[in-house]
Image (cartoon, coloured by chain):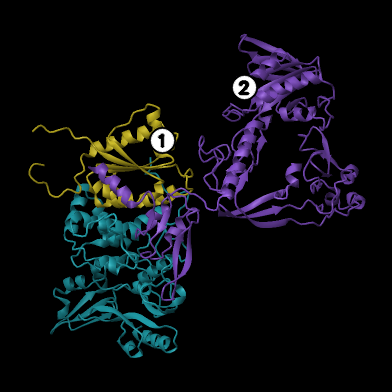
Amino acid sequence: MENRLKEEARKLLKEGKVDYIVGYGNGTVKFRTSPLITNKEEDIESLVINPFIANNLSRYPTEIKGKLGIVVKGCDSRSLVSLMQDNKVNRDDMVILGVPCEGVVDIKKLGEQIGADIDQAKEIDKEGDNLIVQMDGSKKTVPFRDVIFDKCFGCEYPTPLEYDILLGSEVSPRIEIEKSLKKIKEFEDTDAPERWRYWKEQFSKCIRCYACRNVCPACFCERCFVDVNIPQWITTYGSWQDNLVFQLIRTLHVAGRCSDCGECERSCPVGIPLRSLQRKMVEEVKGLFNHETGVDKDAFPVFTHYEATDPEEFIK
Amino acid sequence: MEETKWEPKVVGFLCHWCSYAGADLTGSARMEYPHNIRIIRVPCSGRIDPMFILRALQNGLDGVLVSGCHPGDCHYQSGNFHARRKFAVTRKLLEYVGIEPERVQFSWVAASEGPKMAQVVKEFVEGVRKVGPNRLFKDEIRDGE
Amino acid sequence: MVESSQNENIEILTYSEVEEVSGYIGNFDVRIRKKARLVDMKKCTGCGTCYQKCPVKVPSEFDMETGMRKAIYIPFPQAVPNVPVIDKVNCRMFTKGKCQICQKLCQAGAVDYEQEDEVIEDKFGAIVVATGYDLFDASVYGEYGGGRFKDVISGLQLERLISPAGPTGGHILRPSDGKEPKNVVFIQCVGSRDPEKGFPYCSSVCCMYTAKHAVLLKEHIPDVQTNIFYMDIRSAGKNYEQFVQRTMEQYGALYIRGRVSKIYQRGDKLIVKGADTLAGSQVEVEADLVVLATAITARHDSKELAKILGIPYDQFGFFTELHPKLAPVETVTSGVFLAGACQSPKDIPDTVAAASGAAVKVAALFSGDFLSMEPLVSTIDTSVCSMCKACMEVCPYKAIQEEEITLRDGTRKKQLKVLESVCHGCGACVSTCRSSCIMLKGMTDEQIFEELMAVAL
């Protein structure tokens, strides 16, 4: 897949079909990838595709001018479609290189599985359904499904839904939605005060770095509501109350446009389980309005349209 | 010091054309509803941002009532339809994070429905009274509280 | 009508329908379908030979089926324009494929069987809706014969029988056998004030036209006896009560307060059984003619028209005014005005008053160089707008549009703007804008925030 990508990317740049290639390169820390954005042919050799490509690159087309060749996984492609519906990106300005995705490795989970920091690993390879981790003098085999992100269990669309070039063969979806939603369901079963206390605790940790906002493809506003100072809805210093309100409103703003890529949670430096809120909204939007982000290219954005028959049993 | 009895204090966002007129009618028809509600008039239920609801709760109000025209009766044709979608998810999210559902109530009250307005406010205030004072956004209980 | 048709600033488009209205006050784009009347309006001289010689006779709609018209016809002698129309459903040229009598006889060569609908698209500054009303179909009342008796007619049919230009030339002759009626029963509130079979509202005109009919009948037939079954006499209006009193005292109309329970035929008479609630007794009247004061209803297609114009209507299909007291001829769609019975049942003085009001509103609108609007409109801070255009999609009035501007350095930039004359100030865009870059003047977030803070104190 990686060689195919390099070949296609080189061709696209050479033929002048795109101005930039947006893909993955190796990060500064071992086994982690970071976005690689380039218009130079010599950089193409650095492009990678491996089980660690977590970033959702669909954010970049809203920020880079010019034609892009962009690498997307299943969830990323849905973000991209959602951005088209939001008039933020133009399909004609992109050549989409689709990566059928079997799941992305959660480095934290992998560390737990091998019982050591993954920096100590020499080499990690995927062989069939297992990950082979080469350590100093030892070799560990870890089942792949034990180390992928929770979101990947619920992924119904692992193969990109929108692409120009598909870099591999289609992947059939892993239908383990129950496993993916387990935490949400368990959490819902607790008492309301319990739940409130939980979030209060979580948001006491928040340092308002806005990594969640900055990484989210649906957060493309020129000015975020949290930066509005007339009136100042939310103070700039990080009290847990304001942190929580900020996140709740952000969750409502991206509801219906969130593809459950999980980047908010992955990027959170203090480990707030943000995906729990987002995933809950994905479920609700699907249940209430039968809308799934980025699945139907011709669908309308969910909060700018309505049906006369929308549910209203909650209204007196 | 003798403690004064707690009374719920709630805010109502009422659309100008239906619910506000309905509340007005309640008064002119000499019907009563609990004095616990303070009303803020907005042009349309579509004007109401979920931020208003959260901000009200954050500032210690015990409940928020949002009321607009019946579907199809919106003075601006579609405002309440958009509002309905927004409120449907807002409600679910607030409940998910542990805000008691009794604290946030939505209703459709037409300009001619004075008695309904009184009924809605009454039931809502009773619901809020049941769940008690809003301490959600309070910091840990300090001395004297 | 004749005077209007001769005014150079008035163009009358009859036999035409409005198909689509877009745009806004001062700038409506209207598509009108001018239906093919199969007679060239420019060539026709209005001589009338065609409809004198046409061999097909069908019941006349204008005469409420009390008389006949031809397949090529003008609805009534004073109709404007005085150009006939061919009724395709009944014309022999269309039913049998031959005839052409009118075409052969027309000296001006105006008859054109091939003529097609014409679609007119034009700009207008304001629209006045004066589409009138429909008459309630009284056949749902089985007790009044359910439409079986020829001599049970509506007030409007009696109106045609009295008219000198009507089917009987102004002689009041009953439909069944053409005899002059000597005993006439009027029944009020047929379909009005009856939520069960008709409508809960009062049609407002029937009390007065029934009194007028009683007077006219007496003037035409001096030995006639008129009996009027009524619920209440609603004669509010200048000199109306005196008129009703005169009808009773000078013209001998017998007012009976009560409802009619049954009408049946005996010989050539209609037996009307009813109650006199003031006397507390049953009454039976042997009538030659029964006239029903049938309710005024909204036009059958008023809801479709309302959707085209973007104006609201009530549960009966009458168009809703902006404010019942303070803006009775305006609608929520600025630039669209109401006149007459399309809004609610109205008699002639009320209709003339409403029409004058609407006309003056339009004149006042056109007389200014600038339009004064409600100050509650949205405005966009384009410097922070991220152009997701969600506001455009939620706006029910299409008041937000994209424009292209040239920046100081010469580059072109697309941005959104609010058409202030179109914006109604609902604020749906404000709450939809995630980055709060739209503000509703007079109802800004800041104002609501302050209100909220004051309430929360």
Q: Position of residue A220 (x, y in %)?
A: 34, 67
The colour with which the image depicts chain C is: purple
Pointer 2 and pointer 1 on the same chain: no
Q: Nearer the viewer, residue A123 or A91?
A: A91
- Disc marking residue C235: 2
Quarter where residue A118 is shown: bottom left
Q: Which residue is mark 1?
A: B22
Residue projecting furthest to the bottom: A42
**Label 1 SS:** helix
Chain coloured yellow: which letter?
B
In this picture, residue A114 sits left or right of residue C112: left
Q: Position of residue C375 (x, y in %)?
A: 43, 49
The colour with which the image depicts chain A is: cyan
- Disc marking residue A190: none
Q: Nearer the viewer, residue A68 or A313?
A: A68
Note whether C110 is above or below A293 in the view shown: above
**On what subunit does the disc labeled 2 rest?**
C
Q: Residue at x 26, y 73 (%)?
A: A105
